[in-house]
């Protein structure tokens, strides 16, 4: 599904912040519309149209960075949990 098709389905506002996006060139502008995959590719989100929305490039990038930070924190928590269990056991 293309940006154009998603725009006709969901409008011109960002899925995350609700503000209008830019649809003209250059696409490298942080305010440009990008296709947001609501579910990770590991969950099949990339190939399913119902899991796609439009978001600003900057909102898409920030969401991905926050998800990575959360994943790193979770992994650190798991490592600490394992270390604690090893000391106790």
Image (tube, rainbow, N blue to C red):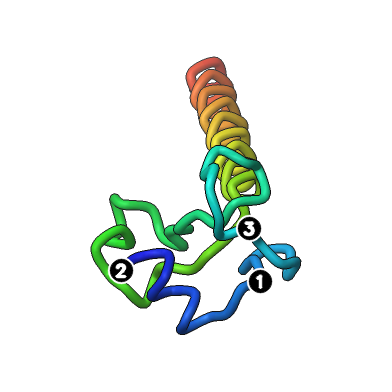
Few, some or many residues within 10 Å of mark 3 (<14, 14–19, 20+): some
Q: CA distance from mark 3 to mark 1?
A: 9 Å
Q: Which residue is mark 1?
A: 13
Q: Which residue is mark 2?
A: 1
Q: CA distance from mark 1 to mark 2?
A: 17 Å
Residue 81 is situated, as x and y percent measured from the top left of the image, at 56, 29
In the image shown, does 20 or 53 lie closer to the viewer?
Answer: 20
Q: Which residue is mark 3?
A: 22
| Vertical arrangement, residue 72 with respect to residue 55, above or below | above
Number of marks in picture: 3
Q: Residue at x 49, y 75 (%)?
A: 7
Q: Residue at x 52, y 44 (%)?
A: 27
Residue 55 is situated, as x and y percent measured from the top left of the image, at 58, 60
| Label 3 or label 1, whichever comes before in sequence order | 1
Few, some or many residues within 10 Å of mark 2 (<14, 14–19, 20+): few
- Dot 1 falls on a residue whose secondary structure is loop
| Label 1 or label 2, whichever comes before in sequence order | 2
In the image shown, does 16 or 11 lie closer to the viewer?
Answer: 11
Q: Are marks 3 and 1 in contact (CB under 8 Å)?
A: no
Q: Which numbered mark, 2 or 3, is in the foreground of this view?
A: 3
């Amino acid at each position: 599904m293309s940006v154009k098709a998603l725009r006709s389905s969901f409008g011109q506002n960002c899925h995350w912040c609700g503000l209008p996006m830019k649809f003209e060139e250059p696409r490298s502008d942080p305010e440009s519309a990008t296709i947001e995959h609501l579910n990770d590719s590991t969950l099949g989100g990339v190939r399913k149209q119902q899991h796609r929305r439009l978001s600003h490039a900057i909102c898409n990038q920030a969401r991905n960075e926050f998800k990575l930070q959360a994943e790193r924190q979770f992994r650190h928590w798991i490592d600490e949990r394992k270390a604690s269990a090893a000391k106790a056991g």
